[in-house]
Image (tube, rainbow, N blue to C red):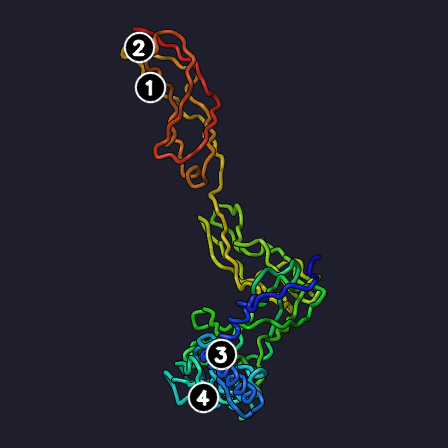
Amino acid sequence: MMNSRPTKKPDGRGPFRRLRRWIARLFGSKIFLAVISLLCAVLTWSIMVASDGTLTRQKVFQSVAVTVNNEAALQSRGYIVMDDITELVPSVKMTVEVTQSNYNRVSGTMFNPHFDLTKIEGEGENVLPISYSTSQLYGTVISCEPSSVTVNVERYVTKRVPVVVEVTGKMPGGLYLNGYRSDPTTLSVSGPQSLVTSVARAVVKLDQSTLSARRMEDSAALSIELQDAQGQSVVSDKLEITNQSVITSEVMVETELAPMKEVPLETETFVTGEPAEGYVLTGIELATESVQVAAAQQTLDAISMITTDAPLDIEGATRDVSGYVRLRRPSNIENTLPTEVAVTAHIEEETVERSFRQVSIEVDGLDDGMSARLSRTSATVQLTGGYGFINGLSQGDIRLFVDLDGLEAGEHQVPVQIHIDNAQPFTCALSSPEITVTITAP
């Protein structure tokens, strides 16, 4: 019969025996007790700090934006900073001592890091320290990097300059820009002395191509361009343009248009007198055949020709005559006509005809010992040429001849030739261009 009582386990052989021994040794060691004491002390200190809002802690803010204050106040003192401070120092690094209660909600912008321009002392280089707002509510700034900036300062001056309207572009056909004016006619330019003194004018550009017959009287706001004495643009964000203390960048320009048309010049009226005898006026050449005239439409419709009351005198002329002739200006026209026009009167010698009868025909080139008999011994000559040359000839100046050089005995048809000493260009017609010559041997 078996024993049903459970078997008793040996002492010290229960589960987790090693773990229980390790925990017992750990809790009993001095190191464990020291660590536990330190953790308790830290925990107690943290609880005390967290519960006391008056205690302060340091907090670092990176890349806090910087502002610039009192620019207007500096300008009222007659100075201006030439450098862009926010570009030189766009942001700063700040170390701030803040109260425990505000630690998590405070930001760098609350301390307003800025440069105060009222601390500038005069022209030239100035070192501006960084300024910031301190508050007992949020804490105190301990340090700021960078802590200052070096800037260049100039005198701040104001100068009045004229407004100049430059007309550009092409006017639409049939229109004339009768007048324009700017409002205002002068402007004030303020800024650094080195820039303001170089400004000579304020220029606005009027583009004629934008004008229209639908608006014969119009006005437009045109952008201002500052220029120096050489016409170069003067551009700077430090310059300020004002009109009666109001900052502006545009000028009003009023325009007035008039209708215009092309009017021909009455050429025949630009020359007076007669050339010398034997000379004729062959043409009148004008530098321009017409001019543009602008006027009220009723006046414009009544103008058909432009004439002159002081024509070019060609009396007794023997060659071309050139000069300037004054134009007669019609009344009530709007545009400025040219006061005069260049005129050339082309004068040429008259071409005339003259006949000479019974001019003897001579023989040239006949071999020695031979004789020649001509079917005609004279001919009528008709000469055409310049008046002076033809009328200056006498019959003795004209020589008709036949050239028999190299011809043998017999009958020949030979041309009649003409010769005039120092002859000018002319043409000749003979009553007998050819004759029969009979050559006889000895």
Q: Nearer the viewer, residue 71 or 237?
A: 71
| Nearer-N-terminus badge (4/3) | 3
> For residue 398, which quarter of the picture?
top left
**For the residues bearing labels 1 and 2, Cβ distance under 8 angstroms:** no
Marks 1/2: CA–CA distance: 12 Å
Q: Quadrant of the C terminus?
A: top left
Residue depth check, mark 2 versus mark 4: number of the one nearer the observer: 4
Local packing at callout 4 (Cα closer than 10 Å; few below 14, some 14-19, many 20+) is some
Say which residue label 3 marks: 28
Q: Is residue 85 visible?
A: no
* Secondary element at tag 1: strand
Marks 4/3: CA–CA distance: 82 Å
Residue 366 percent location from the top left of the image: 31, 14
Say which residue label 1 marks: 364
| Nearer-N-terminus badge (3/1) | 3
Residue depth check, mark 4 versus mark 3: number of the one nearer the observer: 3
| Nearer-N-terminus badge (2/4) | 4
Say which residue label 2 marks: 370
| Nearer-N-terminus badge (1/2) | 1
Q: Nearer the viewer, residue 162 or 438?
A: 162
Query: Of the residues shown, which amino acid type is indicated by label 3?
Result: Gly
Residue depth check, mark 2 versus mark 3: number of the one nearer the observer: 3
Query: Of the residues shown, which amino acid type is indicated by label 4?
Result: Gly
Res 78 label:
4
Task: Give me the residue at 34% from left, 8% from top.
Answer: 408
Marks 2/3: CA–CA distance: 176 Å
Residue 436 percent location from the top left of the image: 43, 13
